[in-house]
Image (spheres, coloured by chain):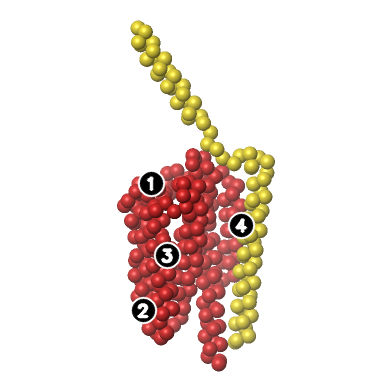
Amino acid sequence: MKNIIVRISGLVLLLVTNFGFAQTEVEMADTMRSEGKIYVIVAIVLIVLAGLVVYLFMLDRKVKNLENRLK
Amino acid sequence: MKVWLKVIAVLLLVYVHTAGLLMDVPRLNILNETVRALYFHVPMWFGMVLLYLMSVYYAIRYLKNPTPEFDVKSVAYAHVGTAFGILGMITGMLWANYTWGSPWHGDPKQNGAAIALLVYLAYFVLRGSLDNEEQRARLSGVYNIFAFAAMIPLIFIIPRLTSSMHPGSGGNPGFNAYDLDSRMRLVFYPAVIAWFLIGLWIVSLRVRIKKLEEKIIERE
């Protein structure tokens, strides 16, 4: 009888601990998002992107100018 | 290249870089927020493969019908494709450092990608070592077919046959399981399209500059 109680309580303990593990949250950058700082990164990335795109357009125009001159 | 295509590419990139950082992603252990690297790292490789595909297409067209224009296009596509590949390699190493533990893991996917890039670097060595233009175009056209035929198994087939930690190879699910749920597809596919269009744009610039150089040589 004592043996059965030990076994059952062990099983219950196992279930409880497993349940606890399943609830563990995966770490993500939530704080950063809630404080709004993520938008700083978004802005920085977009500025770099915009700079490169403008550069590409300017290069495009430069080639077009050369093409016109050599026509 | 049409201007509206360039504008679409830019708009898609702005969307990808905003949504890629802000939209919800699956919560996964070890990966954490780096799962977002999928939006920025993988499109480099997709872009590279698509550009190499265009390169081998023009190489075959040159071999069928030897017109210098096809050779110019073939080499421009290979050049921009290699640039994409190098960026994919560097971003992949950075990602691997924080998820696999070290930048170079000797993973079959990494090794295969490195060998594929070396095969394409040899393409430029081959071109640089030949003075005769027709010979250079013909030989590098043949080599281009070999390089493409080597790149596909090195990147897509061999890593699948062995054990690899890279998603999409060695028993790891690629697009369907944890890696790319439907939310991520909404950012990932536009990213691939946008970067491929940017690649085409740079290729068109290289082709136009090459034509200008030829015109200047003609005049002198």
Task: State which chain is coloured yellow.
Answer: A
Question: Which chain does tag 2 point to?
Answer: B
User: Percent x, y for residue B85?
Assistant: 47, 62
> Residue tagged by mark 1?
B172
Q: Amino acid at mark 2?
A: Leu
Q: Amino acid at mark 3?
A: Leu
The shade of chain B is: red
Image quadrant where one finds the N terminus of chain B: bottom right
Q: Residues within 10 Å of mark 2 (few under 14, many from 20)?
A: some
> Residue tagged by mark 2?
B139
Q: Earlier in the sequence, mark 4 or mark 1?
A: 4
Q: Quadrant of residue B111?
A: bottom left
Q: Which of the labelled discs sits on residue B14, or is there none?
A: 4
Discs 4/1, front:
1
Residue at image point 50% right, 58% down: B90
* B137 versus B23 height, above or below: below
> Residue tagged by mark 3?
B117
Discs 4/3, front:
3
Q: Amino acid at mark 1?
A: Asn
Q: Earlier in the sequence, mark 3 or mark 2?
A: 3
